[in-house]
Image (tube, rainbow, N blue to C red):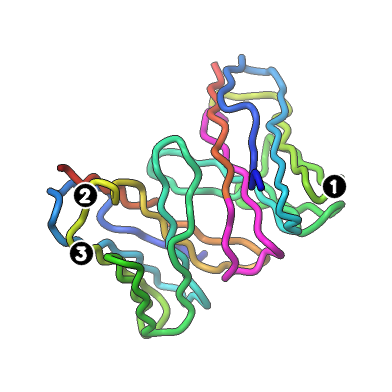
Amino acid sequence: NAGVTQTPKFQVLKTGQSMTLQCAQDMNHEYMSWYRQDPGMGLRLIHYSVGAGITDQGEVPNGYNVSRSTTEDFPLRLLSAAPSQTSVYFCASSYSGGSQETQYFGPGTRLLVL
Amino acid sequence: TQLLEQSPQFLSIQEGENLTVYCNSSSVFSSLQWYRQEPGEGPVLLVTVVTGGEVKKLKRLTFQFGDARKDSSLHITAAQPGDTGLYLCAGAGSNYQLIWGAGTKLIIKP
C-alpha cells in the first residue's frame, strides 16, 4: 500500500494563479481531509469529506474548493492564489472519521505564493 | 471554542536526559492523540488516550491523560537523537474535526 500520496511536493505560484493539489489514498478510507500547517499555529482544517460526494468546511475554508467524486481522491483547488496561502498543505485520511481513529497523513505540498 | 496549548514550544536537550511536554486545555476531550512529525514529512500517530487518568507506555515514551480529560503529558526517558521532531497533540472536537495544538519542537543533541 502506498498510503496517502500528494502531488506536487513543491509549487511556486504568482498571486492570482489557480492550481489543484492532488491527494489519493489506497486504504479504502471514507474520511479524508485537508490541513494547512503554518509556523506556531499547528494544523488547521480546511475542508473534509466523510465519503464520496460529501464534503464540508473546516476552520479555514475561504479561498479553497474541494470535491470528492471517488473514495480514493480528494483534490484541493486554490481558486486565486494569495500570499496568505503560502503554507505547507497536508492531506489525511482515516477509516470513518472517528476521533479515536488513526489519521494517516501524506508527505505534504509546500506552496509559495509570490 | 476548544483550544489546546502545548508547552514548551521548543526544547533542546542532551542525549540521555529526561523530558516532559504538556498539552493543556480548559475544555474536556473525549479522547486525545499524540503525533510526531519529522522534517519534510506528515505527522505519525504515537498513541490515543481515552480514559481519564490513563497511562500508556511506548518504549521510553510515557503518555498520561489527565483525570478530568482536559490535559495530557508526554514523558521521554533517556532521550535519544531519534526522538527529535515536532510533537503534536490533538483532541476530539465536534463534527469529525480534531483540535490541534501548535506543537513542541524537540531537539536531542548527541
Q: Nearer the viewer, residue B39 or A58?
A: B39
* Residue bearing mark 2: B11
Q: Secondary structure at mark 2?
A: strand
Which numbered circle lies on residue A108? Answer: none
Q: Is residue B109 magenta?
A: no
Q: Residue at x 20, y 64 (%)?
A: B77
Q: CA distance from mark 1 to mark 3?
A: 45 Å
User: Which three-letter amino acid code belongs to the residue tagged 2?
Assistant: Leu
* Count of marks, rendered view: 3
Viewer-closest of A27 and A77: A27
Q: Residue tagged by mark 1? A: A70
In the image, is B19 to the left or to the right of B69?
left
Mark in the foreground, 1 or 3: 3
Q: Position of residue B76 (x, y in %)?
A: 24, 63
Q: Chain of mark 1?
A: A
Asked if both marks, 3 and 2, belong to the same chain, the answer given is yes
Q: Amino acid at mark 3?
A: Thr
Residue found at x 65% / y 30%: A7
The correct choice, above or below, for A109 with respect to A55 in the image is above
Residue B35 vertical position relative to residue A40 in the rendered view, above or below? below
Question: Is residue A89 located in the magenta-colored stretch of the structure?
Answer: yes
Q: Magenta residues?
A: A84-104
For disc 3, the neighbor class at 10 Å (few under 14, some 14 to 19, many from 20) is some
Q: CA distance from mark 3 to mark 2?
A: 14 Å
Q: Quadrant of the C terminus of chain B?
A: top left
Q: Nearer the viewer, residue A36 or A94?
A: A94
Splitting the image into 4 quarters, where does residue B60 fall? bottom left
Q: Which residue is mark 3?
A: B77
Quadrant in which residue B59 is drawn: bottom left
B46 relative position to A10: left or right: left
